[in-house]
Image: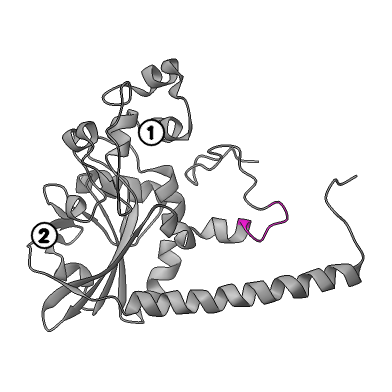
Amino acid sequence: MTKHMTGTRKEWLAARLELLEAEKELTRRSDELARRRQELPWVRIDKEYRFETDEGKASLADLFRGRSQLLVYHFMFGPDYTAGCPSCSAIADGFDGFAVHLANHDVTLCAVSRAPLAKLQAFQRRMGWTFPWASSLGSDFNFDFSVGFTREQQREGGIEYNYRREAPAPEPLAGKTVREWQLRGGEGPVAQIAAMTGTDVATYTRERPGMSAFALEDGVVYHTYSTYARGLDGLWGMYQWLDRAPKGRNETGVWWRRHDEYTKG
């Protein structure tokens, strides 16, 4: 017998219509936020960034692929990772379906990570993805857009992520393996996900997720928008479905895996 509140169809309809008004208000508010995003001032980018892509070396302007708008997903895959972040991988599972529609609306969707291109290509083949994915290794791109950080920043409290400065990383975080972190009582979702990328907690958290938008006009690239952390929720397709499921997100920990790692039932 369910412990959830039950009722008649009439009671359900009354509650549903009340909820519908709140949903409509949220939609209107979301439309307003989208308009405000588009009204942000554009920042001209004069710095030269270089990337490695399937087609060879590329500039930031090259990543547009002849279109006027570029959406970059900052995918957590650092040089020392053995596999891409499982959370970023879950988000990226939807990219191929969206990318073709965006491309036909003057928008290029591209992932960028600091791992060497060969690592990205191998992981992309494993996942069966085809969206553009560029390596920014050796470039300041990730650092300048607040999704890549150094050991010194981590140790000294120089990390500014999601528009906030973080406190210095305490021991035993910095430089400890996942196993050592767990033995000191640090077992948790971050340690679990770090293990899934083949790294220690400190190495894993020197990369961060985010997305940035750019415009290209008259040969000039402009930065128009960036968002991080929970600001990416709307891009994480599975959560949009779970939020409408009877039990919602219903999470007690890191339950998701890369799509080829679930036990076949």
Q: Give the residue number, with chain letter if any, for mark 1.
A: 194
CA–CA distance in space, label 1 to label 2: 28 Å
Q: Position of residue 184 (x, y in %)?
A: 42, 16
Q: Position of residue 10 (x, y in %)?
A: 90, 72
Label 1, residues with CA under 10 Å away: few <14, some 14-19, many ≥20: many
Q: Is residue 245 magenta?
A: yes
Q: Position of residue 185 (x, y in %)?
A: 46, 19
Image quarter (top left, top right, bottom left or bottom right) of the N terminus: top right
Q: Which mark is residue 209?
A: none
Judge from the rendering whether residue 93 lies leftward or rightward of residue 68; answer left or right. right
The magenta stretch spans which residues? 242-247
Image quarter (top left, top right, bottom left or bottom right) of the C terminus: top right
Judge from the rendering whether residue 90 lies leftward or rightward of residue 174; answer left or right. right
Q: Position of residue 76 (x, y in %)?
A: 32, 46
Q: Given the image, on which type of amino acid does mark 1 rest?
A: Ala
Rendered residue at 60%/38% (across/down): 252
Q: Give the residue number, with chain letter if any, for mark 2.
A: 49
Q: In the structure shown, which secondary structural element does the residue marked by tag 2 occupy?
A: loop
Per the picture, the main secondary structure of the magenta-coloured stretch is: loop
Q: Given the image, on which type of amino acid does mark 2 rest?
A: Tyr
- Above or below, comparing residue 250 to residue 59 in the picture: above
Q: Earlier in the sequence, mark 1 or mark 2?
A: 2
Q: Nearer the viewer, residue 261 or 37?
A: 37
Label 2, residues with CA under 10 Å away: few <14, some 14-19, many ≥20: some
Dividing the picture into quadrants, the one containing residue 56 is bottom left
Dividing the picture into quadrants, the one containing residue 262 is top right
